[in-house]
Image (cartoon, rainbow, N blue to C red):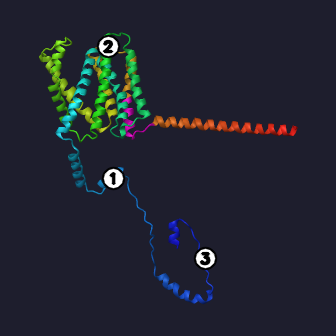
Amino acid sequence: ISSVCAASGYNMHIKLVFPLLSSLQSSLHVCLPAASKKQRVRFSNIMEVRQLPSTQALEAKLSRMSYPAAKDHEAMLRTVGKLTITDVAKISFFFCFVWFLANLSYQEALSDTQVAIVNILSSTSGLFTLILAAIFPSNSSDRFTLSKLLAVALSMGGVALVSLSSMDNPDEKGVIGSLWSLAGAILYAVYIVMIKRRVDREDKLDIPMFFGFVGLFNLLLLWPGFLLLHYTGFEAFELPSQLVWTYILINGLIGTVLSEFLWLWGCFLTSSLIGTLALSLTIPLSIMADICMQKVRFSWLFFAGAVPVFLSFFIATLLCHYNNWDPVLVGLRRVYAFICRKHRIQRYTLLTFTGDKTVVHIRAVQHKN
Protein backbone atom coordinates (compact mmCIF):
# COMPACT_ATOMS: atom_id res chain seq x y z
CA ILE A 1 0.00 0.00 0.00
CA SER A 2 2.79 2.42 0.84
CA SER A 3 4.51 1.88 -2.51
CA VAL A 4 1.25 2.45 -4.41
CA CYS A 5 0.53 5.62 -2.44
CA ALA A 6 4.04 6.91 -3.05
CA ALA A 7 3.68 6.23 -6.74
CA SER A 8 0.39 8.12 -6.91
CA GLY A 9 1.81 11.06 -4.97
CA TYR A 10 -0.36 10.70 -1.83
CA ASN A 11 0.64 10.18 1.78
CA MET A 12 -1.56 7.73 3.64
CA HIS A 13 -1.44 6.93 7.35
CA ILE A 14 -3.01 3.60 8.35
CA LYS A 15 -3.89 2.91 11.96
CA LEU A 16 -3.97 -0.76 12.90
CA VAL A 17 -6.12 -1.83 15.85
CA PHE A 18 -5.43 -5.15 17.57
CA PRO A 19 -8.34 -6.07 19.83
CA LEU A 20 -6.55 -9.00 21.34
CA LEU A 21 -3.19 -7.39 21.92
CA SER A 22 -2.49 -9.35 25.03
CA SER A 23 -3.08 -12.68 23.33
CA LEU A 24 -0.81 -11.80 20.41
CA GLN A 25 2.18 -10.56 22.38
CA SER A 26 3.65 -14.02 22.73
CA SER A 27 3.35 -14.82 19.03
CA LEU A 28 4.85 -11.46 18.05
CA HIS A 29 7.68 -12.02 20.46
CA VAL A 30 8.46 -15.27 18.71
CA CYS A 31 8.04 -14.07 15.11
CA LEU A 32 9.83 -10.76 15.25
CA PRO A 33 13.35 -12.08 15.86
CA ALA A 34 12.95 -14.57 13.02
CA ALA A 35 11.72 -11.87 10.65
CA SER A 36 14.50 -9.50 11.62
CA LYS A 37 17.15 -12.03 10.68
CA LYS A 38 15.87 -12.30 7.10
CA GLN A 39 16.26 -8.89 5.43
CA ARG A 40 14.22 -8.13 2.37
CA VAL A 41 14.80 -5.59 -0.34
CA ARG A 42 11.87 -4.18 -2.24
CA PHE A 43 12.23 -2.38 -5.56
CA SER A 44 9.78 0.20 -6.75
CA ASN A 45 7.90 -0.39 -9.98
CA ILE A 46 8.58 3.19 -11.06
CA MET A 47 11.47 3.57 -13.50
CA GLU A 48 13.05 6.85 -14.64
CA VAL A 49 14.37 6.94 -18.19
CA ARG A 50 16.53 9.85 -19.32
CA GLN A 51 17.38 10.49 -22.94
CA LEU A 52 19.75 13.02 -24.48
CA PRO A 53 18.26 15.46 -26.98
CA SER A 54 18.51 14.66 -30.65
CA THR A 55 21.02 17.48 -31.15
CA GLN A 56 23.55 15.55 -29.05
CA ALA A 57 22.90 12.15 -30.61
CA LEU A 58 26.11 12.19 -32.63
CA GLU A 59 28.21 13.20 -29.62
CA ALA A 60 26.59 10.47 -27.51
CA LYS A 61 27.34 7.88 -30.18
CA LEU A 62 30.94 8.98 -30.60
CA SER A 63 31.53 8.95 -26.84
CA ARG A 64 30.77 5.21 -26.74
CA MET A 65 33.13 4.42 -29.61
CA SER A 66 36.84 3.77 -29.44
CA TYR A 67 39.26 6.28 -30.91
CA PRO A 68 40.11 4.24 -34.06
CA ALA A 69 36.42 3.55 -34.65
CA ALA A 70 35.61 7.24 -34.22
CA LYS A 71 38.30 8.21 -36.74
CA ASP A 72 37.01 5.63 -39.22
CA HIS A 73 33.47 6.93 -38.72
CA GLU A 74 34.61 10.50 -39.33
CA ALA A 75 36.47 9.49 -42.49
CA MET A 76 33.41 7.62 -43.74
CA LEU A 77 31.20 10.67 -43.17
CA ARG A 78 33.63 12.85 -45.10
CA THR A 79 33.68 10.39 -47.97
CA VAL A 80 29.90 10.07 -48.10
CA GLY A 81 29.14 13.79 -47.71
CA LYS A 82 31.84 15.03 -50.09
CA LEU A 83 30.59 16.64 -53.27
CA THR A 84 31.33 14.90 -56.53
CA ILE A 85 33.24 16.47 -59.41
CA THR A 86 29.97 17.16 -61.22
CA ASP A 87 28.51 18.96 -58.21
CA VAL A 88 31.67 21.04 -57.78
CA ALA A 89 31.56 21.97 -61.47
CA LYS A 90 27.92 23.07 -61.19
CA ILE A 91 28.66 25.26 -58.17
CA SER A 92 31.72 26.73 -59.87
CA PHE A 93 29.74 27.53 -63.01
CA PHE A 94 27.24 29.61 -61.03
CA PHE A 95 29.77 31.42 -58.87
CA CYS A 96 32.36 32.12 -61.57
CA PHE A 97 30.38 35.12 -62.84
CA VAL A 98 29.85 36.58 -59.36
CA TRP A 99 33.50 36.00 -58.50
CA PHE A 100 34.67 37.63 -61.74
CA LEU A 101 32.49 40.72 -61.28
CA ALA A 102 33.58 41.10 -57.65
CA ASN A 103 37.26 40.96 -58.55
CA LEU A 104 36.72 43.24 -61.55
CA SER A 105 35.08 45.85 -59.31
CA TYR A 106 37.91 45.62 -56.81
CA GLN A 107 40.63 45.95 -59.46
CA GLU A 108 38.85 48.88 -61.11
CA ALA A 109 38.63 50.59 -57.73
CA LEU A 110 42.36 50.06 -57.20
CA SER A 111 43.11 51.75 -60.51
CA ASP A 112 40.91 54.75 -59.68
CA THR A 113 41.74 55.53 -56.05
CA GLN A 114 44.21 54.76 -53.26
CA VAL A 115 44.69 51.27 -51.87
CA ALA A 116 43.82 52.12 -48.26
CA ILE A 117 40.56 53.82 -49.22
CA VAL A 118 39.59 50.89 -51.43
CA ASN A 119 40.20 48.37 -48.64
CA ILE A 120 38.19 50.32 -46.08
CA LEU A 121 35.29 50.95 -48.44
CA SER A 122 35.35 47.26 -49.34
CA SER A 123 34.93 46.45 -45.65
CA THR A 124 31.35 47.71 -45.94
CA SER A 125 30.56 44.25 -47.26
CA GLY A 126 30.13 43.30 -43.60
CA LEU A 127 26.80 45.12 -43.52
CA PHE A 128 25.58 43.42 -46.68
CA THR A 129 26.85 40.06 -45.42
CA LEU A 130 25.02 40.49 -42.10
CA ILE A 131 21.75 41.27 -43.87
CA LEU A 132 22.03 38.54 -46.49
CA ALA A 133 23.16 35.92 -43.95
CA ALA A 134 20.13 36.71 -41.78
CA ILE A 135 17.84 36.32 -44.81
CA PHE A 136 19.59 33.19 -46.15
CA PRO A 137 21.16 31.54 -43.07
CA SER A 138 23.42 28.52 -43.42
CA ASN A 139 23.81 27.73 -39.69
CA SER A 140 23.11 29.20 -36.25
CA SER A 141 26.12 31.53 -36.41
CA ASP A 142 24.37 33.60 -39.09
CA ARG A 143 21.66 34.74 -36.69
CA PHE A 144 21.05 38.48 -36.67
CA THR A 145 21.81 40.22 -33.36
CA LEU A 146 21.98 43.82 -32.25
CA SER A 147 25.57 43.36 -31.13
CA LYS A 148 26.62 42.24 -34.61
CA LEU A 149 24.77 45.20 -36.06
CA LEU A 150 26.63 47.49 -33.67
CA ALA A 151 29.95 45.95 -34.73
CA VAL A 152 29.11 46.50 -38.38
CA ALA A 153 27.90 50.03 -37.60
CA LEU A 154 31.25 50.65 -35.93
CA SER A 155 32.92 49.62 -39.17
CA MET A 156 30.58 51.84 -41.16
CA GLY A 157 31.37 54.75 -38.87
CA GLY A 158 35.03 54.28 -39.64
CA VAL A 159 34.21 54.29 -43.34
CA ALA A 160 32.34 57.58 -42.90
CA LEU A 161 35.38 59.16 -41.24
CA VAL A 162 37.60 57.94 -44.04
CA SER A 163 35.22 59.46 -46.58
CA LEU A 164 35.30 62.78 -44.73
CA SER A 165 39.09 62.72 -44.75
CA SER A 166 39.11 62.48 -48.56
CA MET A 167 36.67 65.36 -49.07
CA ASP A 168 39.46 67.97 -49.03
CA ASN A 169 40.46 67.24 -52.62
CA PRO A 170 37.42 65.62 -54.21
CA ASP A 171 37.64 64.53 -57.80
CA GLU A 172 35.52 62.54 -60.18
CA LYS A 173 37.97 59.66 -60.27
CA GLY A 174 37.83 59.19 -56.52
CA VAL A 175 34.03 59.06 -56.60
CA ILE A 176 34.09 56.45 -59.35
CA GLY A 177 36.61 54.38 -57.38
CA SER A 178 34.38 54.53 -54.31
CA LEU A 179 31.42 53.30 -56.34
CA TRP A 180 33.51 50.43 -57.71
CA SER A 181 34.53 49.53 -54.16
CA LEU A 182 30.93 49.48 -52.94
CA ALA A 183 29.88 47.36 -55.90
CA GLY A 184 32.64 44.89 -55.12
CA ALA A 185 31.58 44.81 -51.47
CA ILE A 186 28.01 43.86 -52.42
CA LEU A 187 29.19 41.18 -54.84
CA TYR A 188 31.57 39.70 -52.28
CA ALA A 189 28.71 39.51 -49.76
CA VAL A 190 26.47 37.74 -52.27
CA TYR A 191 29.32 35.40 -53.18
CA ILE A 192 30.22 34.25 -49.66
CA VAL A 193 26.65 34.01 -48.33
CA MET A 194 25.38 32.00 -51.27
CA ILE A 195 28.31 29.59 -51.41
CA LYS A 196 28.16 29.00 -47.66
CA ARG A 197 24.45 28.32 -47.92
CA ARG A 198 25.11 25.85 -50.73
CA VAL A 199 28.02 24.12 -48.93
CA ASP A 200 27.51 23.99 -45.16
CA ARG A 201 30.78 22.22 -44.24
CA GLU A 202 34.34 22.78 -45.38
CA ASP A 203 35.00 19.05 -45.83
CA LYS A 204 32.25 18.70 -48.44
CA LEU A 205 33.89 21.00 -50.98
CA ASP A 206 37.30 20.56 -52.54
CA ILE A 207 38.36 24.22 -52.52
CA PRO A 208 41.31 23.90 -54.97
CA MET A 209 39.07 22.03 -57.40
CA PHE A 210 36.40 24.70 -56.97
CA PHE A 211 38.76 27.53 -57.88
CA GLY A 212 40.19 25.44 -60.70
CA PHE A 213 36.75 25.11 -62.28
CA VAL A 214 36.09 28.82 -61.69
CA GLY A 215 39.25 29.72 -63.62
CA LEU A 216 38.43 27.23 -66.37
CA PHE A 217 34.92 28.59 -66.88
CA ASN A 218 36.19 32.17 -66.87
CA LEU A 219 38.74 31.26 -69.53
CA LEU A 220 36.21 29.48 -71.74
CA LEU A 221 33.24 31.80 -71.34
CA LEU A 222 34.55 35.31 -70.77
CA TRP A 223 37.17 35.67 -73.50
CA PRO A 224 34.70 37.45 -75.86
CA GLY A 225 34.84 40.33 -73.40
CA PHE A 226 38.28 41.25 -74.76
CA LEU A 227 36.84 41.81 -78.22
CA LEU A 228 33.85 43.69 -76.86
CA LEU A 229 35.99 46.09 -74.84
CA HIS A 230 38.44 46.54 -77.71
CA TYR A 231 35.95 47.40 -80.46
CA THR A 232 33.81 49.60 -78.22
CA GLY A 233 36.89 51.66 -77.37
CA PHE A 234 36.49 51.17 -73.63
CA GLU A 235 39.87 49.44 -73.30
CA ALA A 236 42.27 48.61 -76.11
CA PHE A 237 43.52 45.04 -76.26
CA GLU A 238 47.29 44.62 -76.36
CA LEU A 239 49.70 41.97 -75.25
CA PRO A 240 51.29 42.76 -71.88
CA SER A 241 54.98 43.39 -71.54
CA GLN A 242 57.36 41.14 -69.65
CA LEU A 243 57.09 43.28 -66.53
CA VAL A 244 53.29 43.22 -66.69
CA TRP A 245 53.35 39.44 -67.14
CA THR A 246 55.44 39.19 -63.97
CA TYR A 247 52.96 41.32 -62.06
CA ILE A 248 50.06 39.25 -63.38
CA LEU A 249 51.66 35.98 -62.29
CA ILE A 250 52.55 37.28 -58.83
CA ASN A 251 49.12 38.80 -58.34
CA GLY A 252 47.44 35.64 -59.62
CA LEU A 253 49.37 33.29 -57.35
CA ILE A 254 49.45 35.38 -54.16
CA GLY A 255 46.69 37.94 -54.50
CA THR A 256 44.11 35.61 -56.01
CA VAL A 257 44.83 31.91 -55.56
CA LEU A 258 46.44 31.84 -52.11
CA SER A 259 44.46 34.68 -50.55
CA GLU A 260 41.10 33.52 -51.94
CA PHE A 261 41.79 29.95 -50.85
CA LEU A 262 42.64 30.93 -47.27
CA TRP A 263 39.78 33.43 -47.10
CA LEU A 264 37.13 30.95 -48.28
CA TRP A 265 38.49 28.24 -46.00
CA GLY A 266 38.35 30.63 -43.05
CA CYS A 267 34.75 31.51 -43.89
CA PHE A 268 33.80 27.84 -43.81
CA LEU A 269 35.55 27.30 -40.47
CA THR A 270 34.01 30.36 -38.77
CA SER A 271 31.15 32.31 -40.31
CA SER A 272 30.48 34.49 -43.31
CA LEU A 273 30.44 37.67 -41.20
CA ILE A 274 33.82 36.97 -39.58
CA GLY A 275 35.32 36.08 -42.94
CA THR A 276 34.03 39.30 -44.44
CA LEU A 277 35.17 41.51 -41.58
CA ALA A 278 38.57 39.79 -41.70
CA LEU A 279 39.23 41.74 -44.88
CA SER A 280 39.63 44.81 -42.67
CA LEU A 281 42.89 43.35 -41.33
CA THR A 282 44.54 44.47 -44.57
CA ILE A 283 43.95 48.10 -43.57
CA PRO A 284 47.09 48.62 -41.41
CA LEU A 285 49.30 47.00 -44.04
CA SER A 286 47.77 49.04 -46.86
CA ILE A 287 48.27 52.24 -44.87
CA MET A 288 51.90 51.35 -44.24
CA ALA A 289 52.37 50.52 -47.93
CA ASP A 290 50.90 53.84 -49.07
CA ILE A 291 52.92 55.84 -46.53
CA CYS A 292 56.22 54.09 -47.29
CA MET A 293 55.95 53.54 -51.04
CA GLN A 294 53.61 56.22 -52.37
CA LYS A 295 54.49 58.92 -49.80
CA VAL A 296 50.78 59.53 -49.23
CA ARG A 297 49.76 61.71 -46.31
CA PHE A 298 46.55 61.00 -44.43
CA SER A 299 44.69 63.27 -42.05
CA TRP A 300 43.77 62.30 -38.50
CA LEU A 301 40.23 61.47 -39.66
CA PHE A 302 41.60 58.65 -41.76
CA PHE A 303 43.34 56.99 -38.80
CA ALA A 304 40.36 57.69 -36.54
CA GLY A 305 38.18 55.85 -39.03
CA ALA A 306 40.59 52.96 -39.53
CA VAL A 307 40.70 52.09 -35.81
CA PRO A 308 36.98 51.23 -35.36
CA VAL A 309 36.98 49.24 -38.59
CA PHE A 310 39.89 47.22 -37.24
CA LEU A 311 38.21 46.70 -33.85
CA SER A 312 34.90 45.60 -35.36
CA PHE A 313 36.53 42.37 -36.55
CA PHE A 314 37.54 41.36 -33.02
CA ILE A 315 34.11 42.29 -31.64
CA ALA A 316 32.36 40.09 -34.21
CA THR A 317 34.78 37.25 -33.45
CA LEU A 318 33.98 37.39 -29.74
CA LEU A 319 30.24 37.50 -30.40
CA CYS A 320 30.31 34.43 -32.62
CA HIS A 321 32.71 32.60 -30.29
CA TYR A 322 30.29 32.85 -27.36
CA ASN A 323 27.39 31.30 -29.27
CA ASN A 324 25.91 34.48 -30.73
CA TRP A 325 25.99 36.29 -27.40
CA ASP A 326 24.06 39.56 -27.65
CA PRO A 327 25.21 41.87 -24.82
CA VAL A 328 23.58 44.92 -26.40
CA LEU A 329 20.13 43.33 -26.32
CA VAL A 330 20.68 42.08 -22.76
CA GLY A 331 21.71 45.55 -21.64
CA LEU A 332 18.71 47.18 -23.31
CA ARG A 333 16.35 44.71 -21.66
CA ARG A 334 17.82 45.39 -18.24
CA VAL A 335 17.56 49.14 -18.72
CA TYR A 336 13.97 48.79 -19.91
CA ALA A 337 13.07 46.56 -16.95
CA PHE A 338 14.68 49.02 -14.52
CA ILE A 339 12.77 51.97 -16.02
CA CYS A 340 9.47 50.07 -15.97
CA ARG A 341 9.98 48.95 -12.38
CA LYS A 342 10.83 52.47 -11.25
CA HIS A 343 7.83 53.90 -13.10
CA ARG A 344 5.58 51.23 -11.58
CA ILE A 345 6.75 52.10 -8.06
CA GLN A 346 6.14 55.82 -8.63
CA ARG A 347 2.70 55.14 -10.08
CA TYR A 348 1.74 52.92 -7.16
CA THR A 349 2.80 55.61 -4.69
CA LEU A 350 0.82 58.26 -6.56
CA LEU A 351 -2.30 56.10 -6.73
CA THR A 352 -2.08 55.32 -3.03
CA PHE A 353 -1.78 58.98 -2.11
CA THR A 354 -4.67 59.96 -4.42
CA GLY A 355 -6.87 57.22 -3.01
CA ASP A 356 -6.36 58.33 0.58
CA LYS A 357 -7.13 61.92 -0.39
CA THR A 358 -10.30 60.81 -2.16
CA VAL A 359 -11.46 58.87 0.88
CA VAL A 360 -10.85 61.83 3.15
CA HIS A 361 -12.82 64.08 0.81
CA ILE A 362 -15.79 61.69 0.71
CA ARG A 363 -15.83 61.33 4.46
CA ALA A 364 -15.74 65.12 4.89
CA VAL A 365 -18.72 65.55 2.56
CA GLN A 366 -20.72 62.85 4.34
CA HIS A 367 -20.00 64.37 7.74
CA LYS A 368 -21.15 67.78 6.49
CA ASN A 369 -24.45 66.39 5.21
Q: Position of residue 357 (x, y in %)?
A: 77, 37
Please, what is the three-letter code of the amino acid marked with disc 3?
Lys
Q: State if disc 3 and disc 2 touch (CB < 8 Å).
A: no
- Residue highlighted by disc 2: 174
User: Residue at horizontal 43%, vertical 65%?
Assistant: 47
Residue 287 appears anywhere in the view: no
Q: CA distance from mark 2 to mark 3?
A: 98 Å
Q: Which of 177/200 is in front?
A: 200
Is the residue 195 above or below the residue 304 in the image? below
Q: Assign a secondary structure to mark 2.
A: helix
User: Residue at horizontal 63%, vertical 38%?
Assistant: 344
Is the residue 343 above or below the residue 7 in the image? above
Q: Position of residue 280 (x, y in %)?
A: 33, 27
Please tell me whether residue 235 belongs to the stretch shown in magenta.
no
Which quadrant would the C terminus be assigned to in this image?
top right
Q: Earlier along the polypeptide chain: callout 1 or callout 2?
A: 1
Q: Position of residue 8 (x, y in %)?
A: 52, 66
Label drawn at residue 29: none
Q: Assign a secondary structure to mark 1.
A: helix
Q: CA distance from mark 1 to mark 2?
A: 56 Å
Q: Which of 80/72 is in front?
A: 80
- Residue highlighted by disc 1: 57
Q: Where are the magenta residues, as a range?
A: 312-326
Q: Earlier along the polypeptide chain: callout 2 or callout 3?
A: 3
Crowd tier of the residue under label 2, counting other residues whose Cα lies within 10 Å: few below 14, some 14–19, many 20 or above:
many
Q: Assign a secondary structure to mark 3.
A: loop
Label drawn at residue 15: 3
Please, what is the three-letter code of the amino acid marked with disc 2?
Gly
Residue 58 appears anywhere in the view: yes
